[in-house]
Amino acid sequence: MCTLAVTLASCDNENEVPEAPQKTGNVFMKLNLGQKADTRVNEAPLATGTTATVNSLHVYFYKDSDKSIQKYLKVDNTTTPSITDLTTGAQIADVPAVADKVLVRGNVPTSMSLPTSGLITGVENMEVEVTTQNDKGNILLEHLAASILTYAGGGATPIGGMQNGDKYAEIELKPAVARIEVEGLQVANGTAISSFSLDGIYLTNFYQKMKMGDGSSVTKIQYGADQAKYDENAVGTLYTTANKEKLFEKFVSPLGASGNPLAVVCTPSTNRWAYHVFANDATTANDQLQLVFKLSNLQASAGSGLAFPAGHQFLTVRGFKDNAGNIVKLEKGKIYTISKTDFTFDESKLSTVPNTNAVGVWLKVTVKPWTVVAVKPNL
């Protein structure tokens, strides 16, 4: 039967040169896991150096010149090789020799259906929603596409078990998000505020999506200065009940301030309000991530001469500063911690209008010289 099949094929294609079978080989691969960005909402803070949890990996070997996927495999804790194997280094068999790049994505949301063949651009152009990045221990892990190298010998082998001439790739995966941790907020010394409650916390000016290929953040969401926007299920916003504790907090009962100085902190006090966001490289306040704190029950100290209007007041955080006073970029894989002692405010920072833009104003001051006027006394 085999001979007949070959003969018939030969008769139908007399002038066609038989295609040579594609060469395949083995590629050693090792994964290094970066710092973990864990679940958001009310939880214990994370320590530097905490390792990311990996539940699944999508691995693409592709040819860079035409972007064609040459081999795809999904790896989890039960496959061969397994996630554990790859973290120590493992050999991937039957990788087409023309493949010269590898792309790995970890913990891809189950709502996304990834292609397994075709062009790698089909993977790179997919976008991940920030609202998917809230499941504890299941944060998207990414890296820039890595070149497949050839071990030339000499010195320690990059991966155990390799021989001269073996192909290999070392990949460092890191969380695709930045993490914000807020301990609480408190009034400054000398303020006229004698009581207040925290009704909610709302993220705005955040990136809604991230591209799977280069990890760039896209589609910025800004809800502006409309009070009505900063509430659960507000029309035209992503502050839906499904996104509660992802993009906003609304406390069933406002959290009353207490202590001296007057403060509201996460409960228990060892926990933090935590949020995951996509990277933002802006270094100006109006372009960075903004957190809107919605306050109520504001009272002024007796004798201060201050009276707060009825309704809500808003405290808007426009980005974060370093010790030198510069607005910092939000970078993936980093945790930005805000202590209550660094988050102090007084009545001058409050507004009935949330999220007003900070603007730069050019100012010139001229001092007019004295004018001498000779006069006579009126007797």
Image (cartoon, rainbow, N blue to C red):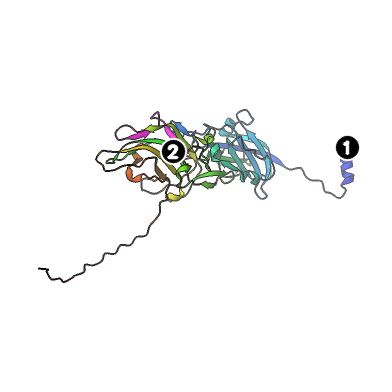
Report the side of 80 relative to 220 (left or right).
right
Q: CA distance from mark 1 to mark 2?
A: 74 Å
Q: Earlier in the sequence, mark 1 or mark 2?
A: 1
Does 369 sit above or below residue 283?
Answer: below
Eyeballing the image, is 308 above or below 267? below
217 and 33: which one is in front? 217
Lateral position of residue 255 relative to residue 15, left or right:
left
Depth-wise, is mark 1 or mark 2 nearer the camera?
2
Q: Amino acid at mark 2?
A: Ile
Residue 69 percent across, percent down from the top left:
68, 43
Tell me if residue 248 can be seen. yes
Within the magenta stretch, is there residue 260?
A: yes
- Check disc 1 and report the residue beneath it: 3
The total number of labels drawn is 2
**Please, what secondary structure does the residue beneath circle 2 have?**
strand
Q: How many other residues sit within 10 Å of disc 1, few (<14), some (14-19) or many (≥20)?
A: few
Residue situated in front as seen by the camera: 180 or 350: 350
Left or right? Give the position of 175 relative to 261.
Answer: right
Q: Amino acid at mark 1?
A: Thr
- Residue 144 position by quadrant: top right
The residue at the point 21 percent across, 69 percent down is 371
Determine which quarter of the picture holds residue 375.
Answer: bottom left
Q: Marks 1 and 2: CB-CB under 8 Å?
A: no
Say the numbered circle drawn on residue 201. Answer: 2
The location of residue 315, given as percent across then percent down, is: 39, 43
Q: Which mark is residue 65?
A: none
- What's the magenta bit mostly, secondary-structure-wise? loop
Magenta-tinted stretch = 257-275
Nearer the observer, 303 or 196? 303
